[in-house]
Image (cartoon, rainbow, N blue to C red):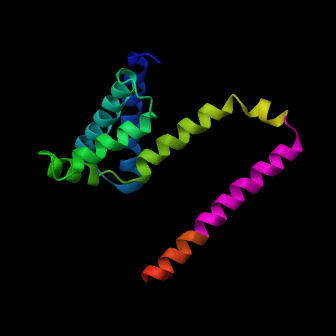
């Protein structure tokens, strides 16, 4: 993917995050703008590093490492990064991720359906099992830690 395409996607993502943060959580656009810029800048740098570094880790690994470094005690901008990103509700970017995931698989639904009803049944079982397994693990950990 070209850098121009990535830039357009990041701008659209930033607008979507700002809109979701405003509509869902009543955070003003100007209040969330610094956090959105920081998150998108970290993402853009992660994409560039992925393209330049010969070690082919997933982009999300580079972005995660950059985010950790930006918020770590060794970073001079740590306080600003944490304060600005703290104004972005976690589910606001998640809305955009879900939208992108839906768009990316929408073209593959026909080929998925050609696999037959058994594949659909297996998919339902896998998703249900993953959800129930995650819920069970969360329940056990929260009981052990005394959260509930």
Q: Residue at x 44, y 52 (%)?
A: 91
Q: Main secondary structure of the magenta part?
A: helix
Front in this rendered view, residue 38 or 14: 38
Check residue 123 for magenta coloring. yes
Q: Is residue 68 left or right of residue 126?
A: left
Q: Is residue 46 left or right of residue 82?
A: right
Front in this rendered view, residue 120 or 84: 120
Q: Is residue 65 left or right of residue 121?
A: left
| Total tally of numbered discs in the picture | 0
Quarter of the image for residue 59 reads top left
Please, is residue 8 above or below residue 75 in the view?
Answer: above
Residue 36 can be seen, yes or no: yes
Check residue 148 for magenta coloring. no
Of all residues, the one furthest to the front in this rendering is 55
Q: Residue at x 36, y 49 (%)?
A: 22
Please, is residue 137 above or below residue 93 in the view?
Answer: below
Q: Is residue 110 left or right of residue 134?
A: right
Q: Residue at x 35, y 25 (%)?
A: 53
- Segment tinted magenta in the rendering: 115-135
Of all residues, the one furthest to the right in this rendering is 117
Q: Residue at x 69, y 28 (%)?
A: 107
Residue 82 in the image: x percent, y percent? Answer: 22, 52
Residue 122 in the image: x percent, y percent? Answer: 80, 50
Residue 45 in the image: x percent, y percent? Answer: 30, 30
Please, is residue 137 above or below residue 23 in the view?
Answer: below
Residue 147 can be seen, yes or no: no
Residue 60 in the image: x percent, y percent? Answer: 43, 39
């Amino acid at each position: 993917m070209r850098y121009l395409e990535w830039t357009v996607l990041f701008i659209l993502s930033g607008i979507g995050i700002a809109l979701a943060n405003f509509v869902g959580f009543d955070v003003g656009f100007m209040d969330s703008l610094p956090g959105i810029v920081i998150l998108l800048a970290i993402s853009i740098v992660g994409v560039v590093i992925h393209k330049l570094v010969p070690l082919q880790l997933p982009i999300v690994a580079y972005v995660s490492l950059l985010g950790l470094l930006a918020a770590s005690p060794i970073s001079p901008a740590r306080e600003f990064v944490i304060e600005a990103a703290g104004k972005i509700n976690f589910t606001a970017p998640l809305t955009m991720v879900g939208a992108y995931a839906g768009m990316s698989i929408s073209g593959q639904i026909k080929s998925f359906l050609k696999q037959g009803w058994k594949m659909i049944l297996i998919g339902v079982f896998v998703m249900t099992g993953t959800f129930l397994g995650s819920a069970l693990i969360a329940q056990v950990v929260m009981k052990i830690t005394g959260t509930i």
